[in-house]
Image: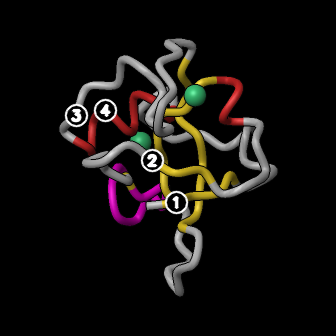
Amino acid sequence: MKVKNTNGTATRSCKCGTWIEHWRNFSGQLATICRAKGCSRKDIVGAHVKKCNSSDNYEYIVPFCNFHNKQSDCIELNDRTVLTPANKNFTCK
Ligand SMILES: [Zn+2]
Ligand SMILES: [Zn+2]
């Protein structure tokens, strides 16, 4: 699956504290490295993304390193990476 970073979201937060904690809380997975395919950097953040080539226009959180968090192109994710909805109505409202 490919995703694309969304802009202007850095200042938003939720009660999980950080977006990477939000992802951990709702994905049921452990985040240790960036989930971009082929990347193994550990300086990860909870990146806001949307799906590429999809009619699904919701925002999701995935663990990306600082490098991939700044890319503007579509990024292929590692298989089995869970996309956690960024919308608090679906998660930690
Ligand atoms: Zn949260
Ligand atoms: Zn990366």
Which mark's residue is nearer the viewer, 2 or 4? 2
Residue 37, relative to residue 4: is it above or below? above
Residue of label 4: 24
Pointers 2 and 3 in contact (C-beta within 8 Å): no
Residue of label 3: 29
Which mark's residue is nearer the viewer, 2 or 3? 2
When asked about the image quadrant of residue 26, the answer is top left
Residue 30, relative to residue 93: is it above or below? above
* Quadrant of image for the C terminus: bottom left
Residue of label 2: 77
Closer to us: 75 or 70: 75
**Residue 57 vs residue 29: left or right?**
right
Q: CA distance from mark 1 to mark 3?
A: 19 Å
Q: Which residues are magenta?
A: 85-93
The quadrant where ligand 1 appears is top left
Residue type indicated by callout 3: Gln
For image coordinates 53% across by 87% down, the residue present is: 55
* Quadrant of image for the N terminus: bottom left
Q: CA distance from mark 2 to mark 3?
A: 15 Å
Is residue 4 covered in magenta?
no
Closer to us: 41 or 92: 41
Q: Which of the two labelled residues, at mark 2 and mark 3, occupies the earlier sequence position?
A: 3
Residue of label 1: 2
